[in-house]
Image: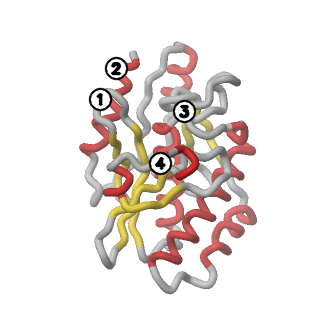
């Protein structure tokens, strides 16, 4: 099963970065429990998320799905992070960090993922815990909603991707800076729920980058 997960994770690389903002968001499901399988069929993952109705993954490899409904006032707090608009792409990436952090916090309160610890922490079990596949999917959901709300203007959402090959794959969401066409990893996996993600050039991330505290 672990090998299957690794292969499927690696295949994320095949996604088109340019078409990602138009395609429905599809999680990678590896579900062992029949009840969870039926739940995923009866309540499918929302491919085109909006703040009042979106899905996120948890439980490792999207084995569990939560459905979230933000109120207008909650979404307004997200919008406020982009006012005034960024004057350059670097400033917009800082706004994105804060927005994803806030969305993780508000989502965690509804989904039970506020207990998510950094990396693949399993001492408390998997319920509410996220692995890198969950994180890459959820961050992509947040980026899609921010993009659709025209809060992101100097970047565009790109596809999820991975590094490490089949033996030790690690996944991330990505964005592309429009002016320079530079692609950035947006990686939330290294931190616990509600902490800002790392946003770094994808080429650096692909080289095996990790936060200094973990080096």
User: How far apart are the two marked residues, 4 and 1, measured between alpha carbons?
Assistant: 19 Å
Nearer-N-terminus badge (3/1): 3
Mark 4 touches mark 3? (CB < 8 Å)? no
Mark 1 touches mark 2? (CB < 8 Å)? yes
- Point out residue 69 in the picture as x, y percentages from the top left corner: 67, 50
Mark 3 touches mark 1? (CB < 8 Å)? no
Q: How many marks?
A: 4
Please give the residue where the numbered disc 4 appears in the rendered image: 210
Disc 1 packing (10 Å; few <14; some 14–19; many ≥20): some
Residue found at x 45% / y 46%: 47
User: How far apart are the two marked residues, 4 and 2, measured between alpha carbons?
Assistant: 24 Å
- Point out residue 115 in the picture as x, y percentages from the top left corner: 72, 37
Please give the residue where the numbered disc 3 appears in the rendered image: 43
Disc 2 packing (10 Å; few <14; some 14–19; many ≥20): few
Quadrant where the N terminus sits is: top left
User: How far apart are the two marked residues, 4 and 3, measured between alpha carbons?
Assistant: 35 Å
- Point out residue 17 in the picture as x, y percentages from the top left corner: 29, 56
Q: Element at badge 4?
A: loop
């Amino acid at each position: 099963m672990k090998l299957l997960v690794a292969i499927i994770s690696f295949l994320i690389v095949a996604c088109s970065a340019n078409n990602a903002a138009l395609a429905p968001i599809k999680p990678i499901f590896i579900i062992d429990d029949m009840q969870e399988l039926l739940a995923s069929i009866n309540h499918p993952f929302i491919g085109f998320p909006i703040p009042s109705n979106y899905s996120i993954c948890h439980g490792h490899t999207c084995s569990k799905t939560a459905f979230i409904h933000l109120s207008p006032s909650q979404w307004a707090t997200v919008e406020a992070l982009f006012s005034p608009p960024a004057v350059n792409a670097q400033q917009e990436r800082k706004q994105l960090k804060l927005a994803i952090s806030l969305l993780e916090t508000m989502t965690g309160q509804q989904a039970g993922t506020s207990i998510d610890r950094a990396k693949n922490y399993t001492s408390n079990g998997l319920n509410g815990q996220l692995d890198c596949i969950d994180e890459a999917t959820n961050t992509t959901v947040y980026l899609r909603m921010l993009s659709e709300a025209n809060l992101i203007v100097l970047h565009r959402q790109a596809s999820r991707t991975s590094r490490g090959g089949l033996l030790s794959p690690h996944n991330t969401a990505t964005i592309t800076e429009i002016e320079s066409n530079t692609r950035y990893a947006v990686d939330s996996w290294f931190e616990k729920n509600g902490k800002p993600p790392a946003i770094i050039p994808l080429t650096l991330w692909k080289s095996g980058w990790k936060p200094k505290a973990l080096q």
